[in-house]
Every structure is written in C-alpha cells, then in structure tokens.
C-alpha cells in the first residue's frame, strides 16, 4: 500500500474520518446463563425431589407472606420512612423478617452458606458493595445486615417486595432522570455519613451478571469518598447455574430448578475494608476502579466494560429471538467514541436485523447493497468497508454500530448533511426534484438505475410533493447515517 492510498484510507469518510479502533470483547457474554439441562440425570433428580419441592415451595410461600405481614407490622404508623432513621424498636421488629429471608434461602436449597472474612462494623465501613448474580444475593444481605439499599423507584410499588424495600429505608432512584440520580447520590452520602442508619448497600454493577467476570461499576457507592467493604458472592455448581440474567431461565423456572436440587452452594466473602486515598476522594471513578480490580483479583477473574445498558440490549436481543451476545456493545468502551444511548442502540439493532436478510447475524456485501437498494460498484464497496474494518466480508452488529454511532454523533454531522443535500441539488437554485437527484447521484454511482433512484426519492420525499426538502433529507440521514457516507466517501472534497 503506498502512502497516498494509506492517506485516503485514513481519511475514510472525508472530513469525518474513521472511527477510532476500540477494543470490544467479542466473545464474553456476562448476561448468559450457561446452564445445560443435561438429560436423564436431571429429569430423574427432579422427579425424585418433586415431593421435597412441594414442601419447600410451601415453606417459601408461607415465609414470604409471614415476612410481609411482619413488615407491615414493623411499618405500622411509621412516617417519613425513607427520610428519617427508624428507632431501635422498629428495627428489632424487622428481626423476624430477616429470619424469614434466611428461611426462604433455605427453601431454595441454600441450606448452609459458607462465610469467609469479617463483616466490618458500621462505623468503620458505612458502605457495602457486592457483585450481583441472582435474587439470592439481596435476600442474604437483607438477612445479614438489613441494609439501606439503592433501588429503582418503581420497585417501591412492587406487591410484597415493595413493603420490604420500604422497611429497608431504601434510597429510590429514577435511573432515567438526572436530578433523581443526583438526589440519590446526595442521599447515599447523607445516610452513609450518619451512624443512626444501617449500612448502605450497593450493587455497583447495577444489574445481575453470571458472576464469571465483573462488569463496569457505577460511581454512586464511591462518590461520598467513604471507606467501603467489598463482598464477593459466589455460587459453585455442577448442574444448576443460579444466575438470573437476560439469556437464561425466567424466575419461576429458576426457583423450580433450585428447589429440585439436593443442595445449592453459596459462599459469601467479606474482603478487607478499602479506604480511598486523597486522589480517589476527588475522583470516584478511580476509586470504583480500584475496588473493582481488588474484587476481581480476589475472585480470580477479570473485568469488562459492559454496563447496565448492555443488560438492556441483551434483554432486547432475547425478545427479538437472537443470540444476546451478538447484541452487546460494551457500553463502557463504546461510549468513548460516541454518547450513544440504549434507545439509539436498540434502533440500530432493529435496523441491522432488517438488513440482515440471510439471518446469519452479520451483513455480507450482498445483504448490504440489497438493503440500501443500490448497485454493486466500487463506491458502495468502500462504504461497506467503512464498517468492515477487518476486511472479513461480513459486518457484525458491533462493527455496524461503531460506524453508525461514530458518524451520527460527529460534531460535523449536520454540516455534512447540508453539504450532501446541496450536492444533490446540483447547480440549480430550485429545490431538487427526482431527475436532479438522479443526475447528481449518477456523478457518484454511474450505474445507479432510474428505478433505484425512484424508490429512494419516494422514501426521501415524505410529503409526496415531488421535491426534496432539506428537513426530509436530514431526517433520512438521521435514521440512515450510512446513506451520508455515500456522499462523504464518494466526494472527499464535500466538507
Ligand atoms: C430532588 O430533591 C429535591 C429536593 O430535595 C426535590 O424537590 C425533587 O423533587 C427531587 N427530584 C427527584 C426527581 O426526585
Ligand atoms: C485462577 O484462574 C485460572 C484460570 O482462569 C486458573 O488456572 C487458576 O488455577 C486459578 N487460581 C486460583 C487460585 O483459583
Ligand atoms: C460486485 O462486483 C464485483 C466485481 O466488480 C464482484 O467480484 C462481486 O462478486 C460483486 N458482488 C456482488 C454481491 O454482486
């Protein structure tokens, strides 16, 4: 490759340039339960344990309802439940409820739970952080600490669990709203600072994973700059992986499987308290990262940049009936190139799936030109290679999303849209019509057919007035940023 070619390659889409290379872990999916339902032994065991399961289920339901009634009692005539600490007598009333949680774990086959390390007293480490695998983790932590948790607002209205969460004097947060997140952050600080409250307990991953790696930590637990005690919860299993994740058993099946096991293993390890240094009190993300790496080392595992947003995408993938691993973007890494949000990613995924006519989970060049309905020519090949950076002949969703996210969030995106629009208008001063668009496009793609331009024009001309308006052109580019690449790559002097 000579230097001229290399320069061109680097320039990619004219003035917009190529998206930077980002490291995206393609193989690991933290939201998949790798449990295999392996045949005869499992079925035999389930049949054998069915009577045990019935007893366990009865115990579970009874203890749940009892716990609920006792919680209602503990909350009797309580005011300002979420804002002022309970007196000791009210906390004592919660003691039997905590035992109910332990009974529930017992009913799920967690007969004994292996403890390691020393839980630190409240005044030494006001904040607890733990990895999050399944519903059993909060049950255990509730039993052991009756902590103040941070939870989504809507959980306060859950049937039974809502009352219990209130009794934990939870910090409720609306994850979408910025002010609510700020409020929650203030509340974490306020409650952690004062020893009248219980421990503040946070799952910094903000979602469940299969526990094999640690995903990104949200900074919430680390913003106050107080000492934290990390907790590691592990489930060792042979037949039944208890993780509750996007691609895995639904909660009822999970409970059923757990209750038809002889025994389920759970171990909880309290790591030594971690104190933030001066730099880390000013930079919570840095503190979060050190705690995360300490936990990963203790778990003998590594970390990824997946976030709560990826868990949402995994759920979307399951809903669309595709492999959830192929839909993950590793948002923590991805957001370095673009402020892409979950809703953008979902839109991108659904577009990718409509283009993927062969349903292979990747786009070949043939799929691509068929989807955009343009001829096979060297320009379209270049546009395709903008996504297929490794020249492998197929584009994965991740590669597609990287290109789309980079272009659509580029600072000069709007400017590029106007330039491309002006290019379509040719030399004329009037708004471009179909013959003008045909003439302009033929400059870039000589082999484009009248029929193809007709269909394209039809999609662009939303109001069906026979003219191409800038607003329509711009909204088409918003939805199909790859369309803009045809102009940017085809005419490098455009910007
Ligand atoms: C945040 O807190 C302020 C004052 O404490 C309150 O007025 C506001 O409604 C809260 N906002 C949200 C979204 O919870
Ligand atoms: C840590 O994990 C590696 C493989 O991931 C394994 O070979 C090694 O034995 C593990 N070490 C401990 C102490 O468990
Ligand atoms: C596109 O054209 C090239 C040659 O110009 C050819 O090798 C390739 O197979 C064509 N691809 C498709 C999908 O038609």
Image (cartoon, helix red, strand yellow):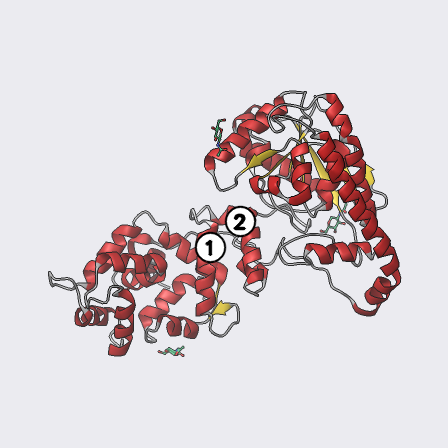
> Which residue is disc 1 drawn over?
345
Label 1 and label 2: CA atoms lie apart by 9 Å
Give the structural element (helix, strand or loop) at label 1.
helix
Which quarter of the picture shows residue 117?
top right
Q: Position of residue 469 (x, y in %)?
A: 21, 60
Instruction: Pick whichever, 99 or 312, lies toward us.
Output: 99
For mark 2, does the 10 Å Cα neighbourhood hold few (<14), some (14 to 19), or many (20 or more) residues?
many
Name the residue rendered at 60%, 41% in the picture.
157
Mark closest to the chain's N terminus, 1 or 2? 2
Residue at x 17%, y 63% (from the top left corner): 425
Q: How dense is the environment of label 1, judged by Cα within 10 Å: few (below 14), some, or many (20 and up)?
A: many
Residue 59 got which mark?
none
- x%, y% of residue 327? 53, 59
Return the x and y of residue 118 as percentages of the image width and height: 78, 30
- Which residue lies under the disc numbered 2? 309
C-beta proximity under 8 Å, tags 1 and 2: yes
Q: Quadrant location of residue 218?
A: top right
């Amino acid at each position: 490759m000579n230097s001229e070619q290399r320069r061109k390659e680097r320039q990619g889409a004219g003035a917009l340039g190529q998206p930077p290379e980002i490291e995206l872990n393609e193989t690991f999916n933290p939201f998949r339960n790798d449990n295999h339902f392996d045949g005869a032994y499992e079925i035999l065991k389930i049949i054998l344990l069915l009577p045990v399961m019935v007893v366990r289920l009865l115990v579970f339901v009874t203890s749940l309802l009892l716990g609920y009634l006792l919680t209602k009692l503990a909350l009797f005539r309580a005011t300002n439940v979420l804002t002022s600490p309970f007196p000791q007598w009210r906390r004592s009333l919660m003691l039997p409820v905590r035992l109910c949680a332990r009974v529930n774990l017992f009913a799920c086959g967690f007969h004994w739970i292996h403890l390691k390390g020393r839980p630190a007293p409240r005044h030494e480490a006001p904040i607890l952080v733990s990895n999050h695998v399944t519903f059993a983790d909060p049950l255990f932590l509730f039993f052991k600490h009756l902590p103040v948790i941070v939870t989504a607002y809507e959980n306060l209205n859950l049937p039974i669990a809502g009352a219990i969460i209130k009794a934990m004097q939870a910090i409720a947060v609306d994850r979408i709203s910025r002010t609510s997140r700020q409020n929650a952050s203030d509340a974490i600080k306020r409650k952690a600072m004062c020893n009248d409250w219980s421990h503040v307990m946070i799952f910094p991953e903000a979602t469940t994973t299969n526990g094999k790696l640690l995903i990104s930590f949200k900074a919430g637990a680390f913003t106050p700059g107080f000492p934290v005690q990390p907790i590691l919860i592990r489930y060792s299993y042979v037949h039944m992986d208890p993780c509750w994740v996007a691609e895995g058993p639904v909660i009822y099946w999970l409970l059923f499987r757990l209750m038809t096991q002889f025994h389920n293993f759970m171990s909880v390890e309290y790591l030594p308290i971690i104190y933030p240094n001066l730099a880390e009190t000013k930079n919570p993300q840095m503190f979060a990262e050190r705690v995360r790496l300490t936990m990963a080392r203790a778990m003998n595992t590594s970390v990824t940049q997946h976030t709560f947003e990826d868990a949402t995408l995994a759920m979307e993938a399951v809903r669309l009936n595709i492999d959830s691993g192929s839909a993950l973007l590793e948002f923590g890494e991805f957001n370095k190139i673009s402020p892409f949000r979950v809703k953008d990613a979902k839109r991108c995924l659904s577009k990718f799936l409509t283009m993927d006519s062969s349903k292979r989970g990747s786009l070949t060049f043939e799929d691509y030109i068929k989807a955009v309905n343009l001829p096979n020519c060297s320009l379209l090949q270049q546009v395709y290679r903008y996504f297929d950076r490794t020249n492998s002949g197929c584009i994965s969703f991740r590669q597609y999303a990287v290109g789309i996210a980079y272009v659509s969030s580029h600072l000069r995106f709007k400017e590029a849209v106007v330039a491309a629009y002006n290019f379509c208008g040719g030399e004329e001063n009037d708004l471009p019509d179909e013959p003008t668009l045909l003439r302009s496009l033929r400059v870039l793609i000589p082999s484009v057919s009248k029929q193809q331009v007709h269909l394209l024009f039809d999609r662009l001309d939303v109001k069906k007035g026979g003219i191409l308006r800038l607003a329509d052109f711009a909204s088409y580019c918003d939805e199909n940023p790859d369309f803009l690449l045809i102009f940017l790559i085809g005419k490098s002097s455009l910007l």
